[in-house]
Image: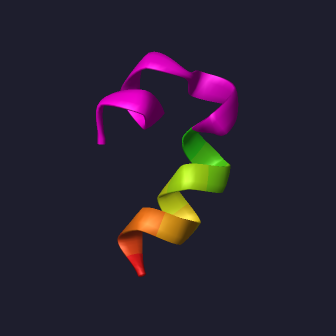
Amino acid sequence: LEKKKFNPFLRRHTLHRETK
């Protein structure tokens, strides 16, 4: 969760993976 907030670019990629 920290990475997606830190990386706006990876936010979409991580969001889709961490959210699920």
| Relative side of 2 to 20, left or right | left
Magenta portion: prevailing SS class? helix
| Residue 2: image location, x then y, percent | 30, 30
| Relative side of 6 to 17, left or right | left
The foreground one among 18 and 12 is 18
Q: Is residue 16 depicted above or below 10 in this figure?
A: below
- How is the model colour-coded? rainbow
| Image quadrant occupied by the C terminus | bottom left
Q: Is residue 20 depicted above or below 3 in this figure?
A: below
| Image quadrant occupied by the N terminus | top left
Residue at image coords 49%, 57%: 15
Q: What span is colored magenta in the figure? A: 1-10
| Residue 5: image location, x then y, percent | 38, 27
| Residue 14: image location, x then y, percent | 55, 52
Is 13 magenta? The answer is no
Residue at image coords 63%, 49%: 12
Is 4 magenta? The answer is yes
Report how many numbered discs are placed on residues in the image: 0
Q: Is residue 17 depicted above or below 4 in this figure?
A: below
| Relative side of 7 to 20, left or right | right
| Relative side of 15 to 5, left or right | right
Residue furthest to the left: 1
Q: Is residue 6 depicted above or below 2 in this figure?
A: above
Residue at image coords 38%, 70%: 19
